[in-house]
Amino acid sequence: MCSADVSHEQWLSRLVDHLQKERYRLKVARRWAASAGRFLAYLTTRGTRVEAAQASDIAGYVKGER
């Protein structure tokens, strides 16, 4: 399955699962997933695929979150 075939919700669910396996509490894992979800939404509004995201996209997102 290529990453283009996976929805944002599926990626976020995988992130929560991974963080729980790494012994993060569920509440913390969900908080990180919510942050990741906001970043994914930011990329979507800019028309940027996750695979094409650059450091400048992260910097722009973080600047906007402040």
Image (cartoon, helix red, strand yellow):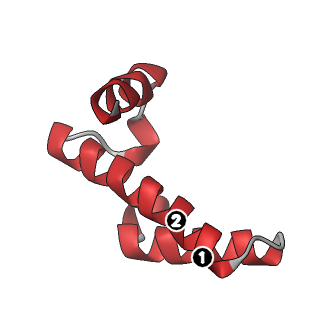
**Horizontal and vertical percent for residue 4?**
39, 61
Residue placed most toward the observer, 51 or 56? 56
| Rendered image: mark on residue 31 | 2
User: Which quadrant would the C terminus be assigned to in this image?
Assistant: top left
Kindly indicate the quadrant of the structure image that contains residue 24: bottom right
**Numbered disc 1: secondary structure:** helix
Looking at the rendered structure, the kind of residue marked 2 is Arg
| Rendered image: mark on residue 52 | none
Residue placed most toward the observer, 48 or 59? 59
Residue placed most toward the observer, 14 or 28? 28
Which residue is at 65% across, 80% downward? 26
Density class for disc 2 (Cα within 10 Å; few <14, some 14-19, many ≥20) is: few
* Residue pointed to by mark 1: 27
Which residue is at 26% across, 44% downward? 42
**Numbered disc 2: secondary structure:** helix
Residue 1 appears in view: no
Kindly indicate the quadrant of the structure image that contains residue 8: bottom left
Residue 25 appears in view: yes
**Image position of 24 with respect to 63: above or below:** below
Apparent side of residue 41 relative to residue 58 in the rendered image (left or right): left
Density class for disc 1 (Cα within 10 Å; few <14, some 14-19, many ≥20) is: few
**Tags 1 and 2 touching, CB below 8 Å:** yes
Kindly indicate the quadrant of the structure image that contains residue 29: bottom right
**Horizontal and vertical percent for residue 48?**
27, 39
Which residue is at 80% across, 77% downward? 21
Query: Spatial distance from mark 1 to mark 2, Cα to Cα?
Result: 6 Å
Looking at the rendered structure, the kind of residue marked 1 is Lys
Apparent side of residue 20 relative to residue 44 in the rendered image (left or right): right
**Horizontal and vertical percent for residue 49?**
33, 45
